[in-house]
Amino acid sequence: MSTYKGFLGWALATAGAVALTAGTAAASVLGGSPSGDTGVTTETSAAIVVYPKIRVDGDEGVDTIIQLTNASEFLTKTHCFYVNANGHCSNAPDTICTQENFTEVCPGGGLCVEGWQETDFRLTLTKRQPVSWSASDGLSSLPLNDIPGKNNQFNEGNIPPVPEDPFTGELRCIQVDTTASELPIARNDLKGEAVIVTDPGDGSVDVSKYNAIGIPAIDGAQNNDPVCVGGTNEGLSCATAADCPGGTCAPNVLNIGGPNPEYNGCPNIITLDHFFDGADVVTHDGASSAVVTSRLTVVPCSADYLNQDQNLARATLQFLIYNEFEQRFSTSTRVTCYREVQLSDIDTRPGADGNAFSIFSASVQGTVTGQSRIRAVAGTSEVGYSGNAVLAILEESWEGGGNCPDADGDGTPECTATTNVQFIGVRDGGDQIVLP
């Protein structure tokens, strides 16, 4: 497979002949908490960066170029986790499936079992060093890893490729101490972006970019104490497993918001300004039009990389949808670890058959655009670590115009644009990330 550097040179050289559609918009946080917690960000560096959507599909020419930058003048180390969200057939474990296609790809009436497997790696970056890599190829070593930078700093580390092709999942990087302890530290030095590239090799190419979501650390709040995860003493400090009846005494637990926060809290509400699915949008010259559909990617703020416990990464999402007539509709859905879904499939059966009857359909709403407000239902816990908050990005597909790839093979080109969303407030109950 060609390197990213080679592809970038080709893309720039042929930009006049190839339509590159890139869409990205920075997220804003409206409102905070009385304690001054300003929540998450996509505009500034942070201690944790989350890339909600990483895609690789060699057959369709899809890859993701990941960018990570040390925004400080100090040596910075990060512990990163790929999360493989591929489903696999219950009666054919090597066969990748989705909830939309499992009846076709799983033999003998098998079901599609959702997966959540992590692959971790570590990087050390020198002063203000950026690094980029292809998710499909990884990076065997960092650039100039044998040449010292300022103050005799050396970068180090290697990045594995994603574990499967095709691959759908997320990437999360957490800043840790550069010493052998690798404990999380209260520094906000990481900034990230992701570029999803579709290049089927027929002269068309589609590029869609978004900013990674940053969760800032609170200065002086990191205590690195073992904490109970699960059980009756969830969120309380512990010395041994006996202190956590029904749970685990975890050595490294990051408190995201909540009563004893080490990091800013995750959002209370997410808002999406979007086209309704099936909206026929006429171009400015009136000569052509494109049909728009949107896909929402949601990941829980919490994660358990030690026990692979999915219970910490579950959420119920409530939607309020407003059209241009100020009419309000509602629906709900569930998320476990990872969810990528077309808006019209949230309240109807997966697949195209029910899309025209969805409350996210332009034909149902009678307007082209609308706004959706998403609120994750908070859990209940005496210690407050039950925020069940989520993070999200939105991807729009414009079918019918431009020199873009035919992604679904129906003979019609399709361009995409990925956008960050708006976050409102922070959740009173906190979330947790459990490190191995």
Image (cartoon, helix red, strand yellow):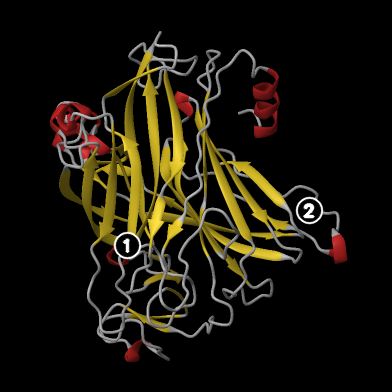
Q: Nearer the viewer, residue 329 or 100?
A: 329
User: Which class describes the residues within 10 Å of circle 2: few (<14), some (14-19), or many (20+)?
Assistant: some
Query: Visible in this render: residue 338?
Result: no
- Quadrant for residue 237, please give it: bottom left
Amino acid at dot 2: Asn
Q: Is residue 63 above or below residue 420?
A: above
The residue identified by callout 1 is: 313
Q: Which residue lies at the image location 27% right of the left edge and 65% below the top edge? A: 311
**Label 2 residue SS:** loop
Farthest top residue?
Answer: 287
Quickly name the residue at label 2: 145
Q: x%, y% of residue 34? A: 41, 77
In this rendering, position of residue 201 left or right of residue 407: right
Q: CA distance from mark 1 to mark 2?
A: 36 Å
Q: Residue at x 52, y 13 (%)?
A: 202
Q: Quadrant of the N terminus?
A: top right
Would residue 115 appear left or right of 55 to someone viewing this image? left
